[in-house]
Every structure is written in structure tokens, then in C-alpha cells.
Amino acid sequence: MSNPRALPDALPEEWIDATGPVESGKLPPGVWQSLLAGYCAFTTFRWPLSEARLTRHVTRLIAHGDAMGITAPALATPHIRNTLTDLAQRQGEAISLAFRLTLAPDASQAGALWQGGGPWPARLLISLRSISGRQRAPLNEHAQGASLQIVGYEKAFPALKHGALAEAMLLRQSARRAGFDDALWRNQRGLLSESSVANVFWIRDGALWTPDPQGDGCLAGITRAEVLQIATANGVEVVEQALATDDLRTVSGGFLTNAVQGLWPIARAQETVMPWPPAARALLTGLQAEYNALDSLSSS
């Protein structure tokens, strides 16, 4: 199904049912009901990526589906990779892609999702879009990074990557209309937890500070975990603890992470401008280099 709202320089977003053949490209009404209700689990990533990374995404997708009472179809990772590879090849080698894998249950009876029950058997849907116009350049005098509007919001079930995101999307749209790139959530305890689409890291006294998924209301992102591994391997101190807005006066820099954009430097959060002294720039540049090297290995 094509997305009529696709940008002129982007591919139309397409949905493919990887579970099995669908007559005339139509999904069962129960699947559409689940998608409209946001009752689905998903994962998103930049293509290409390594077998290990794809396995992590699929494993997390299945686990989050299980936690929601959604049973994934019996599809092996190699089958999924072959499907993604075929779809990517149809678009041409010059186009960078983001894939989204979605587990959507088939609630065959109207209102069944609201009645309880389950677990629900699900279909695996694949969507793709072009990201050829987006860059992941290192921080320098020409690319000062993202601006974030701090918004009081705490996502329901933050540990799960689920599709009930209407509130988050509306708040992000509001931030962008106000001239910011994204919204940064401030949870009920007044701590900065994550952005609408990414985990957040701060550089403070030479250490990396990032919210704790166990208590601060953020997702345990896959790219977040990779950054933590890279930092630890290089002897960088890591503190898993969220900061308050006033704490931003004590940080020297910050960045966002997700599996599409990689590491995206922060220029300012609300009115607080990140100073980015040389040591902080060097730390981010080193992390970006090692992360992007993994991307290069994934592409070979």
C-alpha cells in the first residue's frame, strides 16, 4: 500500500506482508483494526545491517510482542533477511533505506482487542522508506546538531516498542512547528528520559550519562546498547542515570541514538546551548567513528 503523503524526494512507504501471500495486497480487517488501535510491536533500522544486528532487532520484536500478548509467526531471521535484501535491491543501490518490521495481530472479531483474551497470532509486516537525504555527519562547525524542545510527557509502557504513539507524534509535531528538531521528554519525576524517536546521552565530566531503562521511563534501545559497549571497551565511564533540566548547565555535550540515524549530536535543549569543548567533541567523534565502522562492516 502506497503512502500518499510521501515527500517528493522519498520513496513512497510500502507495506509488505512477509507472513504469507495476501490477495490483491489486502490485509485482513482484524490486522487493520490492530494497526489503527496502535496494538502492535515494531522495530526500525537502517539498511544494510549485519546479521547480528538484525538478529537483535528480531529477538527484541518477538519479546515485546510476547509481552503484549502478540504471537510472532514462525519466520527465521535468514528468511526475513532474504526478504529485506530482495526489497532493497528493487529500489536500487544508490538509495539508503529504513526498514520497519511490525507484528500486528489479527483480531478477527470487531472489538475483540478490547475484550481481553489472547495471545493473538500476528502477521509480520515490512515497510520501507528512503533516507537518502539524511546525514549522520560528525559534529563540526558546519553541523551543530539537533535542537530539542523539553516537554513534560511519560510514555505508557516505555519499555516496549509499541505502536500506540499518537500522543508522542503530536508532541513531536508541535516541537517541530516551534522550530525544534525533536521533543525531549521530561518524566513525572522531572528527569529527562528520551526523545520522541531516540535515546539520549550527555557528556558530563568526561563520562557518558544516559537514563536507566529500569527506572527512568526510556526504551532499552539497540543502538544505545552498542554505544554503551563501545564506550566501556574504550575505558569511558558510563553512568546510567537521568538528568534534570537544571543539570544541563553542567554538561559539555549530548547526542541522540537510534538505529536509523546512528549518533546525532545535540546543539541545544530548550534554551541550554551545548558548549562542545574539544574534549567532548573528540569523545563523540571517536564513538561515531567506531559505530560507523560497524555500519561499514555491515555493508560489506
Image: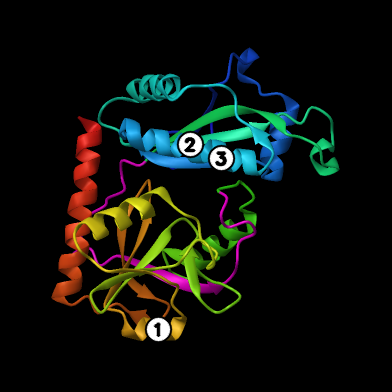
Q: Considering only order in the chain, which callout, 3 or 1, is on the residue closer to the N terminus?
A: 3
**Kind of residue indicated by mark 1:** Asp
Q: Amino acid at mark 3?
A: Ala
- 258 and 16: which is toward the camera: 258
Query: Could you say where residue 174 lies in the image, as x and y percent from the top left?
Result: 55, 66
Residue 125's x, y, as percent?
Answer: 56, 29
Return the x and y of residue 146 as percentages of the image width and height: 34, 65
User: Does the residue at mark 2 contact the one at mark 3 (Cβ under 8 Å)?
Assistant: yes
Q: Earlier in the sequence, mark 2 or mark 1?
A: 2
Can residue 293 be seen? yes
CA separation in Å, label 1 and label 3: 35 Å
The residue positioned 14% from the left and 74% from the top of the image is: 278
* 52 relative to 180, above or below: above
Residue 59's disc is: 2
Against 83, residue 125 (above or below) is below
The part of the chain drawn in magenta is 131-160
Q: Name the residue beneath numbered marker 1.
A: 247
Number of residues whose C-alpha sits closer than 10 Å to that of mark 2, classed few (under 14), some (14–19) or many (20 or more): few
Would you say residue 74 sits in the magenta stretch?
Answer: no
Q: Does 150 appear in magenta?
A: yes
- CB contact under 8 Å: marks 2 and 1: no
Please name the amino acid that badge 2 sits on: Thr
| Apparent side of residue 60 relative to residue 165 in the rendered image (left or right) | left
Please name whichever residue, 123 or 21, is drawn nearer the observer in this view of the structure.
123
Where, by quadrant of the figure, is residue 113 drawn?
A: top right
| Nearest to viewer (mark 1 / mark 3) | 3
Question: Which label sits on residue 144?
Answer: none
Residue at numbered disc 3: 63
